[in-house]
Amino acid sequence: EEGRARFATEYLVAFDAPAPGAYYGAVLAEADKAGRITTVPHDPSLKVDTAWDLGIDDATAIWFLQEAGREVRVIDYFEASGEGLQAIVRQALADRPFVYGRHYLPHDVKVRELGANGRSRLETLAGLGVSPVEVTAAAAPEDRIHALRQMIPMAVFDAARCATGLDRLRAYRKRWNGALHAWSGPLHDGASHAADALGLYALNRRAGSAVKRPARRREHQLDWMA
């Protein structure tokens, strides 16, 4: 029991969650019990922020969020696999009746791609009208996990439109090393893109100054891009 408690504290693993080693199962179960996974209508008076995790061969995940005071409203989720940025922007952004605020993307969006004549995905997105983009600094997985575990208790999720994303969050978990009998960092699978995208948002959102990072790590600087 002592070793179990130490792992739970040190690695932020919810051992009482539905899946062993799941990061968010317990806090999402609490949100469901409290009625915070429900119907969350889009408020036209508030801008919609997006949070992305970009994949090429695997999935691209995008969350749609509105903030009202301290409340974070998670109103929609989009996921696609094997699609180019033009199709993703059309299907995810243009086909939704939202007025957008900030688009939060990971730092690797600035990497230049050989297949795109040396253009970065950031430049491609700008050419497709995705603006303003906030390119977030690289962050350790535990920082994103810590921030999202703090944000979920102040969030409400649309149960229908975010169903796939919520399933991904519940499934996000640590790898189990059978040889060492130890957990060894987040498992990269179909659940990780949605979890990384929402964790990125939790760590960098406009109200993110209220989220305290673990004391053992330094604050990450934001790189603002217009």
Image (cartoon, rainbow, N blue to C red):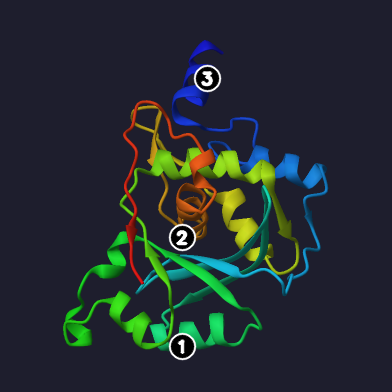
Seen in the picture, residue 50 relative to 221 is either above or below; the reply is below
Q: Quadrant of residue 104?
A: bottom left
Q: Quadrant of residue 177?
A: top left
Seen in the picture, residue 200 relative to 9 is either above or below; the reply is below
The earlier-in-sequence mark between 3 and 2 is 3
User: Residue 57 placed where, x, y %?
Assistant: 35, 73
- Residue at 57% from the left image edge and 72% from the top image edge: 78
Task: Determine which residue is flagged by label 3.
Answer: 4
Give the label, 3 or 2, closer to the camera.
Answer: 2
Q: Quadrant of residue 120?
A: bottom left
- Residue at 29% from the left image edge and 80% from the top image edge: 123
The residue carrying pointer 3 sits among few (fewer than 14), some (14 to 19) or many (20 or more) residues within 10 Å by Cα, namely few
Task: Determine which residue is flagged by label 2.
Answer: 193
- Residue at 59% from the left image edge and 30% from the top image edge: 15
**Residue type marked 2:** His
The residue carrying pointer 1 sits among few (fewer than 14), some (14 to 19) or many (20 or more) residues within 10 Å by Cα, namely few
Visible residue check, residue 188: yes
- In the rendered image, which quarter contains the N terminus? top right
The foreground one among 85 and 204 is 204
Circles 3 and 2 in contact, beta carbons < 8 Å: no
- In the rendered image, which quarter contains the C terminus? bottom left
SS for dot 2: helix
Circles 3 and 1 in contact, beta carbons < 8 Å: no
Q: CA distance from mark 3 to mark 1?
A: 45 Å
